[in-house]
Amino acid sequence: MLRRSGSAWKTSALKVNIHFLRGEQTLKKQLIIVLSLVMVLMLVAAGCGNSNSGNSGSNSKGKSSNTPDSSSQAKDEHALEPYKLTMVYPGSTPNDLKQVQEELNKYLTEKINATIELKPIDWGAWNDKTNLMFTSNEEFDIIFSANWVGYSDNVIKGQYVQLDELIETHGQGAKEVLGPDWLNGSKVNGHNYGLPTLKEFASTGGLLFRKDLLEKYKIDLNTINKVEDLEPVFQTIKDNELGVTPLLASNLQTLAGKLLNFHYDTLGSDSFGVLDPRSSELKVINMYETERYKEVITLMHRWYEMGFINKDAAGIKEDQMNNLMKAGKGFAYNAQLKPGKDAEMTTSLGVEVVQKEFVQPLTTTNEATGAMLSISRTSDNPERAMMFIDLLYTDQYLLNLLNYGIEGVHYVKQGDNVIDFAPGLTAQTSGYNIGAAWMFGNQMNTYLWTNEDPNKWDQFKAFNDSSIKSPALGFVFDPTNVKNEIAAVTNVKQQYDTALSIGQVDPEKYIPEYVEKLKAAGMDKIIAEKQKQLDAWAANK
Amino acid sequence: MNHRAAAKAALNNHAVTKRKRSVSQLLLHILFGLASILTILPIILVFSISISDETSIYTNGYSFIPSEFSMAAYSYLWQDGGAIIRSYSVTIMVTIIGSVAGLLMMTLFAYPISRRDFPYRNVFSFFVFFTMLFSGGLVPWYLVYSNVIDLKDSVWALVVPNLLMNGFNILIIRTFFQNSIPPSLIESATIDGAGELRIWWKIIMPLSMPVLATIGLFSTLAYWNDWFNSLIFISDARWYSLQYVMQKMLLDVLFLSQQSGNGNSALLLATMPSETVRMAMAIIGAGPIVLAYPFFQRYLVQGLTIGAVKG
């Protein structure tokens, strides 16, 4: 078989041999094909070269237009040179982005003689892409920043422009709108590197309940004051509603987590070494050794044993928990709450839900730095970027254009500040529904959807006022010195945390074991480091 | 008597070998049957989820036979067809341009270093070999393609980085050239008056169909399945490749579900496409590349056996 194919080859080779001697015509044809392919490739290369030179040309133009006396720009707004701003923020690209961008450009040219390019980056690619943009010195001006996407890391690396002076010169509007609490809370080492979105300034944890079941069993949430009161409610649901889990949890989102992480100031993104905001002294403690941790976990274990919590909680992901609610398989599930969260979730779940908080709202650095706009160090014109950010706090038209698109095309006004999708459009079919009002500027200036509480912003203000302000508000933990310990402790946490939080295992046995393992992994060292930095911060304040 | 016994013995013997063969045959059939079931079942499951009703999945879990049949996922994708069709055409275009250009460039590189009379063959082989083992790392790699040659947000960002030429493939082609094409053939062509380019195109290439098909399949698959270049280099949604459109969804869900510090992530998560839609996308994404296999397979088997015997 093999030999045969081998000889077949030889004969075919011979044929080829003869063939090329005879058939000059076909050879030419084939050579032409190859050459044309090569040509195509060369054109490609030329194309790349062209676009390259075009870009660098525009870049250098941008630079040269900005270098001459930037100080005079600041003085006289009418003499501003045209400038193209680039704004990078997470989210998917809506279909009508270009259309909205053009509308923004018209308005911005009039206001600050600038145009803007919106560059949304997909959530999943955000960390990779923005890091590469910084390392390759890509030019862009405004970037979304937040503690949960590496704000303090980037500040330490010097990726953001320090804003203190710019706020004074070009950001007076924003400064006035935000007030000192927000600005001080988002400072790192005494300087501002980002302007926080004016939104809820506190966070709290609690549950979202299905409204139809609450009404069916005549449950009044106002009579429930603490988590323990829910036990008879869950029992009713379990006894009467087949196939409905009273309390849903998922691998990372649990009620225990909500009751603990929003009770303490976690002093950073992990819960290793926390601060009790109700105590007057600045003492970093180990949350897993507190009485409260034991109480909460014991309650969860009790409920798990009683069959209130889904048995597969450790294995399901967060989006699957949402799906279970959508399918009517759950009665309540845990969530981070703010006023109007239930209306938001009702829209996106398609199931009517009502919220109930079980923790007093708490304001920590995490809230102050939860969503900000920073200016990249690669910006050619930070002044103009600041002017734009300032407008997002003071100019209602601009902000709503950015958030909701064009009036009459993407939304229609139903009242003064109330909007609905344009006729024939829904949240899914609208060409511009980015759902990102919490990322930009002054959220209290944005329109409300018809299904939202018209008093939402008043409620926000009341919510903000009712919160406890953590004594460590404004403190940012730098984990560099204890990186190894944090990695080791995180490993231990992954092993124990979910099982304990959903109540799967016996707290009497496992909490001491957990605490011991955490200590062996270096928990005490992290706490000591946090304490040291906190003391230094307090001394400088 | 003797004859009969001998005949019987022979018959028995024959039966035994036949039985032996049929037993081993059966075992082999079972083994490979199981192996193919293991690979086919997940695809069937994905398909049947994609044609199931959304809520029936949450209430009953996944099942091979949809408890409630629904084409909602496909009609959702059809409605939002613009993005899918666009990414489909991007992927098809990139796959075709990339594998044809890549194949030409790789053979053009492999051919000289396969010739023993080429003086610098070791130097050029070393380039290939070295880059196979060591790479500059992500950041320098990105810097070259974004700053030195500005490929970002263009279709070339999907064609050139990582995929166009592959050191390992070049070595396979070179080995094939060295072992399967007798140098005397080249010699005789030279005597007949053929130039180097003509020898390559008229003699070497037609004789190398098996390896070309093999490498062609490798690079077609690599292009079809690539999402990383889109993730790194493309921010303009017009140039997203098909696999990235799907990968993006999973990455988004993964990223958002880890953000316990952000109260808005739950809201964003709830607006992500449902599971049936994700499965429908996987089915659509597998699409035409499944058809590429039988086409290449003929050559692939040939290429592998020849390589094995002569290697």
Image (tube, helix red, strand yellow):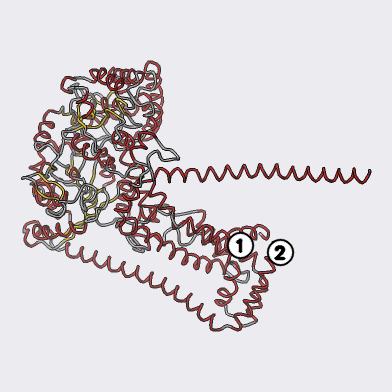
Residue placed furthest toward the top? A508
Chain identifier of the residue bearing label 2 in the image: A
Marks 2 and 1, how far apart in space?
20 Å
Q: Is residue A503 left or right of residue A277?
A: right
Chain identifier of the residue bearing label 1 in the image: B
Q: Amino acid at mark 1?
A: Thr
Q: Are marks 2 and 1 in contact (CB under 8 Å)?
A: no
Residue B145, by quadrant, is bottom left
The residue singled out by tag 2 in the image is A3
Front in this rendered view, residue B139 or B97: B97
Q: Which tag is nearer the camera, tag 2 or tag 1?
A: 2
Specify whether disc 2 shares its chain with disc 1: no
Callout 1 secondary element: helix
Q: Is residue A382 left or right of residue B154?
A: left
The residue singled out by tag 1 in the image is B175
Callout 2 secondary element: helix
Provide residue A539's location: percent of width, then percent of height.
19, 30
Provide residue A307's location: percent of width, then percent of height.
35, 21
Residue A155, by quadrant, is top left
Q: Residue at x 32, y 19 (%)?
A: A303
Q: Amino acid at mark 2?
A: Arg
Front in this rendered view, residue B21 or B296: B21
Provide residue A285's location: percent of width, then percent of height.
28, 23
